[in-house]
Amino acid sequence: MKNLSEQRLRHEVVYEGKFLRLEKDEVLLPNGNQSIREVVRHPSAVAIIAKQEGQLVLVRQYRYALGQETLEIPAGKMEAGEDRDRCAERELREETGYRGRLTYIGSYYSTPGFTDELMYLYLATDLEWDPLAPDEDEFLHVERLPLHTAVADALNGKFVDAKTILGILLAQSKGFFAEEAEK
Amino acid sequence: MKNLSEQRLRHEVVYEGKFLRLEKDEVLLPNGNQSIREVVRHPSAVAIIAKQEGQLVLVRQYRYALGQETLEIPAGKMEAGEDRDRCAERELREETGYRGRLTYIGSYYSTPGFTDELMYLYLATDLEWDPLAPDEDEFLHVERLPLHTAVADALNGKFVDAKTILGILLAQSKGFFAEEAEK
């Protein structure tokens, strides 16, 4: 099998922001030609499928990049040096007010064509009220949907972002919604 | 319900690249405070679940942003003025060599915290060999997996990117793999 890898020839940091860093590299392609790769370096993040009495806990927020409000599963970036389990606990408490029993259920790269952002997915059960203050630039409403409605909405296009659709379908496919479906 | 939206106060284009544009805006938050939003503007893209004789057609490629080879469903960016159906047909032919009967099955925003990239998902069936030359900086191997293996791999973490996991779980949940599962 041919080698597919690309070698870095030149590295440039175009922008270093609060969270993201934009890099523009010149690379050597497998056929000996050269090309440019623009890469957004971004912290890893967590997202949480939080179940409570047969319902999924969601957050409504304004997404500036999209210019619209969205309904998503709670999520957030890992802070420097933060462990992913700790991050999941913190984000769930900040965004929904709940602490829960957390189980890691999978991960994915959001869009590997231009960023290394990695999303860790968790299931949260046995929720107990134990809020933390949200980030000072975050404004959220907590909403709930029956699990079967959430699954239907993941299939019919009512949810718009990858982590919410993927998280719900993954949890459903792994059987984590089965008990509630029987009630 | 409180208004969650954020108003743009100042707009700056930090970087304009071949595909992506990085913007840094100052915004007015719902509570009257100000904050910075860094947004990567990116073309929409398509990704294709291509079925052939009970198998899923995949492409192996080197992802520079991740520094590793990945096995993904075929995908690519929409060109300026290009229709999404046309893009799906072109990308499938460029990346796998096949033309197919295409059905739109859903869409998602990859990661709305920092980019507007929108991914359109298609199902492709009735594949016929009709290749187009790939982009000059793209190097790919076509590989195939039985549909049931692809579903198992979407659940067990063998696939690493959102579009591949989400695309397979969506196609499976919508019943598009059902016929093959019975064979």
Image (tube, coloured by chain):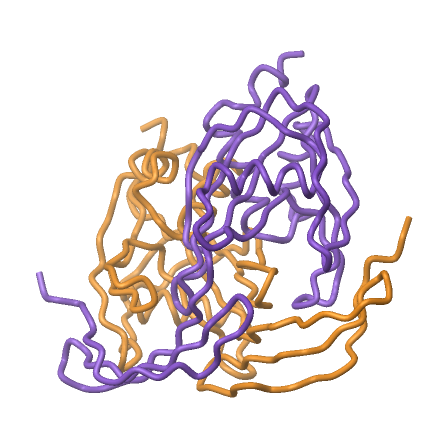
Chain colours: A purple, B orange
Residue B150, quarter of the rendered image: top left
Compared to B168, does B40 lie above or below?
Answer: below
> Is residue B31 toward the left or the right of residue A177 in the image?
right
Q: Nearer the viewer, residue B134 or A73?
A: A73
- Residue A21, given in percent of the width and then of the height, sits at 46, 73
Q: Nearer the viewer, residue A59 or B124?
A: A59
Compared to B9, does B112 lie above or below?
Answer: above
- Residue B168, given in percent of the width and then of the height, sits at 42, 44
Taking the spot 66% from the left edge, 35% from the top edge, the residue there is A150
> Is residue B160 toward the left or the right of residue A135 in the image?
left
The quarter of the rendered structure image containing the C terminus of chain B is top left
In the displayed orientation, state which residue is furthest to the left: A1
> Is residue A9 toward the left or the right of residue B26 in the image?
left
Compared to A56, does A164 lie above or below?
Answer: below
Taking the spot 68% from the left edge, 78% from the top edge, the residue there is B25
- Residue B157, given in percent of the width and then of the height, sits at 34, 39
